[in-house]
């Protein structure tokens, strides 16, 4: 309570009902309002709040309720005219001040209640990360991710209970991290790359060897062109039809904040590759579906982009095109003559861009070097107007 500005403190003191987690209630003592804990499951929070209509209800959250916090969830479900937000100092502001870092120059992330692997996509040389954690174990998990990718010398600082009487700080480096830290903490990471560190940029075109596969995959150069045509955007959904080892879907999710992807793949071994690659490369929320197209497309959320890398047919295209949202992008790649003929026919009917992509890689030829061609790819792309 001591950390609230006077106007906000008055609102809390005048509340009839206060909702929050256990630690919020401990920090807001000596109040006469009825106390309610977070419901289980958490989604029941909205119905709980609606049931209190007409009473003065305060929901307690840490810092800024609209920055990776419960305020956004409430605001999506309840008329904003019925809500007043009272932002206070956020964990990010406090952590940046403790570290002396400029907030516009850092990545602000959360793995609180979310897969911790999603931070992997942000491990870059010289990057500074501020991360809301899930608990005491999270810093050690992130330290392991850093060390495994050649960033073991990265400096890590855990800031616990900032702004309170129990505030504490723990400093170390990733490869030797061994601190026991309080459960409620914020992690600051200054990424330092070793000479042999894995470089995993968020722009498309990761090296093929970073993906587990059976050899059947959209190769690096073709993948970069494919993603450029798909145009990853914040929060957008991709259908990856015939996703194989998941390379296109994973790069889509890495390329834009909160981008989602659904991979449709009938082979269990390839789905297993895709799931492992998604975890290793920072896209743990990749959704994988066992099914054949076009039947497997029924009932899925409408996509913003569609990639057809396998299972191409006129029926599949018709179902995908009908589901695609306005201004959605569709890209189909073909390596066989039969699939190429289908793309040529579709291009004649629907327009778009039809190109043939050819890649040659320099490889040893005895003691010398020569060009070895990959299979040429015919690519058709268009935007739904």
Image (tube, rainbow, N blue to C red):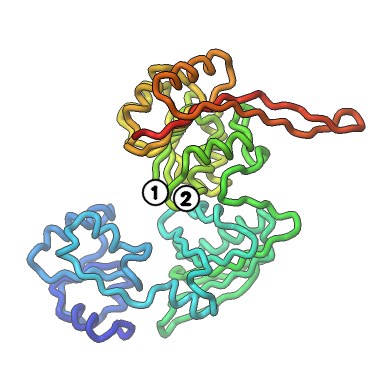
Give neighbour class at mark 2: few <14, some 14-19, many 20+ (Cα, 10 Å). Answer: some
Q: Give the residue at mark 1.
A: 235
Marks 2/1 in contact by CB < 8 Å: the verdict is yes
Residue at (65%, 66%) from the top-left corner?
154
Ranked by sequence position, the earlier of labels 2 and 1 is 1
Q: Quadrant of residue 11?
A: bottom left
Task: Find residue 280 and name its label.
Answer: none
Using residue 302 as the reference point, say whether residue 375 is left or right of it. Answer: right
Where is residue 44? Give x, y as percent.
Answer: 22, 53
Residue situated in front as seen by the camera: 215 or 368:
368
Disc 2/disc 1 C-alpha distance (Å)? 7 Å
Quadrant of residue 290 in the image?
A: top left
Residue at horizontal 35%, vertical 24%?
319
Q: Residues within 10 Å of mark 1 (few under 14, many from 20)?
A: some
Q: Position of residue 333 (x, y in %)?
A: 53, 26
Q: How many marks?
A: 2
Relative to 78, does residue 31 appear above or below in the rendering? Answer: below
Describe the element under mark 2 as helix, strand or loop.
loop
Residue at the image point whose x is 43% and y is 31% from the top:
382
Q: Which residue is mark 2?
A: 256
- Is 58 in front, or is 104? 104
If the image is split into quadrants, where does the N terminus sit? Answer: bottom left
Q: Is residue 3 left or right of residue 363?
A: left
From the top left corner, tell me how far across and down residue 334 is, in percent.
55, 22
Residue positioned most to the left: 54
Residue shown at 39% from the left, 73% from the top:
90
Image side of residue 152 versus residue 46, left or right = right
């Amino acid at each position: 309570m001591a950390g609230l500005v006077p106007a906000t403190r008055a609102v809390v003191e005048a509340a009839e009902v206060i909702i929050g987690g256990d630690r919020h209630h401990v920090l807001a003592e000596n109040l006469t309002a009825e106390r309610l804990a977070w419901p289980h499951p958490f989604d029941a929070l909205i119905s709980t709040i609606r049931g209190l209509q007409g009473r003065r209800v305060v929901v307690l959250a840490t810092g800024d309720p609209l920055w990776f916090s419960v305020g956004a969830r409430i605001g999506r479900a309840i008329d904003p005219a019925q809500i007043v937000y009272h932002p206070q100092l956020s964990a990010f502001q406090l952590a940046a001040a403790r570290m002396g870092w400029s907030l516009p120059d850092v990545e602000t992330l959360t793995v609180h209640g979310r897969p911790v692997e999603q931070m992997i996509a942000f491990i870059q040389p010289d990057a500074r990360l501020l991360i809301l954690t899930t608990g005491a174990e999270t810093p050690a998990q992130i330290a392991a991710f850093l060390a495994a990718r050649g960033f073991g010398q990265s400096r890590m600082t855990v800031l616990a209970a900032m702004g309170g009487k129990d505030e504490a700080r723990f400093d170390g480096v990733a490869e030797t991290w061994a601190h026991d830290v309080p459960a409620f903490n914020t992690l600051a990471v200054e990424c330092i790359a070793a000479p042999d560190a894995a470089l995993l940029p968020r722009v498309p075109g990761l090296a093929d060897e970073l993906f587990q596969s059976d050899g059947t995959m959209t190769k690096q150069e073709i993948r970069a062109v494919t993603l450029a045509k798909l145009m990853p955007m914040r929060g957008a959904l991709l259908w990856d039809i015939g996703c194989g080892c998941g390379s296109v879907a994973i790069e889509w999710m890495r390329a834009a904040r909160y981008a989602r992807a659904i991979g449709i793949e009938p082979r269990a071994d390839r789905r297993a590759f895709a799931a492992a690659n998604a975890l290793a490369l920072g896209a743990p929320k990749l959704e994988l579906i066992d099914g054949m197209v076009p039947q497997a497309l029924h009932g899925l959320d409408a996509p913003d982009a569609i990639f057809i890398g396998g299972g191409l047919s006129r029926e599949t295209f018709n179902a995908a095109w009908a589901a695609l949202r306005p201004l959605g992008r569709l890209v189909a790649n073909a390596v066989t003559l039969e699939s190429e003929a289908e793309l040529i026919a579709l291009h004649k009917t629907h327009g778009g861009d039809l190109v043939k992509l050819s890649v040659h890689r320099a490889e040893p030829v005895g003691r010398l070097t020569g060009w070895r061609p990959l299979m040429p790819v015919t690519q058709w792309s268009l935007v739904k107007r």
